[in-house]
Amino acid sequence: MSFQNLIIEDKGRIRQITINRESKLNALNKETIAELHTAFADAFGDNTIGGIILTGAGSKAFVAGADIAEFVGLDVESATAVARENQKKVFDLVANGKKPVIAAVNGFALGGGLELALASHIRVASSNAKMGLPEVTLGLIPGYGGTQRLTKLVGSGKALEMILTADMITADEAYRVGLVNYVVAPEELITKAEEILNKILQRAPLAIAAAINAVSAAGTPEGFEIEINAFGKCFGNEDTKEGIAAFLEKRKPEFKGK
């Protein structure tokens, strides 16, 4: 499959999706949003792929935000439709995916770029990364899940500070407040993301998918019930029987995703 704004590379069972608009600091325009939808839907549906790394081309930016020029001419109705459609097509698609997505944040992750990282399941940042939600400087608020997912990660106090001041934070501060899982040297960024994914890929795929779904429901009224039902459904999987047998027999399990 050919893309104008993405580079797709496979390394074993890991697929790397790189947003390739380096001259525009990998900003999210309509075409890139559409391509991300296709790329993620394809990766989630490909049985040979176990996990995804998402990053931006070059060293300056993961994604510097949305393409602001595309906001010109929007009114209340059309802006609401854009936010709803793009959340569903990309941000919710990533967050609700059945395979782990790691955002490898290189450089600036601002606005929609930070929201894309927030939609990912795990975040690794290069030491030169800077993150923020500057929408209020345009008279806007985050529209791709930023108010919800940032709050879930760092709490309402820090989320409100970042959103209301529009200030960027460094990679080290992002790590301190729980926004990213690791901070590494720029040259180690993809290697660290691959290391995490390769460890995950040794586990039972159906259990991984169920865990992602249950964690996504944390804090909702249905969260505990979703966890209970998902736990029970595991006992209908061949992998669960294999995992229990392997533990009792003191051997390494051989999971098949069934």
Image (tube, rainbow, N blue to C red):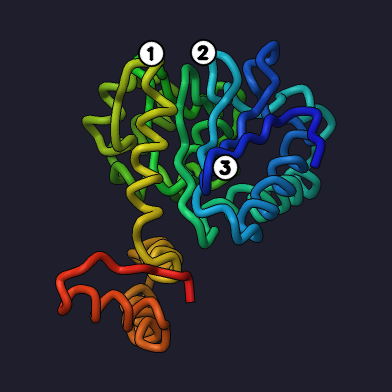
Please name the residue shown 60% across and 26% down the image.
65
Image position of 96 with respect to 14: above or below: below
**Residue 61 image position (x, y, % from top left):** 54, 18
Please name the residue shown 43% across and 24% down the image.
131
Q: CA distance from mark 3 to mark 2?
A: 20 Å
Please name the residue shown 21% across and 30% down the image.
176
> Residue extending furthest right?
73
Side of 16 relative to 122 (left or right): right
**Residue 213 image position (x, y, % from top left):** 44, 66
Give the quarter of the image for residue 248: bottom left
Side of 198 relative to 181 (left or right): right
Q: Nearer the viewer, mark 3 or mark 1?
A: 3
The residue tagged 3 is 15
Label 3 residue SS: strand
Label 1 residue SS: loop
Image position of 92 with respect to 70: above or below: below
Residue 217 visible to the viewer: no
Q: CA distance from mark 2 to mark 1?
A: 9 Å
Please tell me which of labels 3 and 2 falls first in the chain.
3
Residue 59 marker: 2
**Residue 157 image position (x, y, % from top left):** 28, 40
Q: Residues within 10 Å of mark 2 (few under 14, many from 20)?
A: some
Q: CA distance from mark 3 to mark 1?
A: 24 Å
Residue 143 marker: none
Q: Residues within 10 Å of mark 3 (few under 14, many from 20)?
A: many
Looking at the image, which is closer to me, 239 or 74?
Answer: 239
Residue contact between numbered discs 2 and 1, judged by CB atoms under 8 Å: yes
The residue tagged 1 is 128
Please tell me which of labels 2 and 1 falls first in the chain.
2
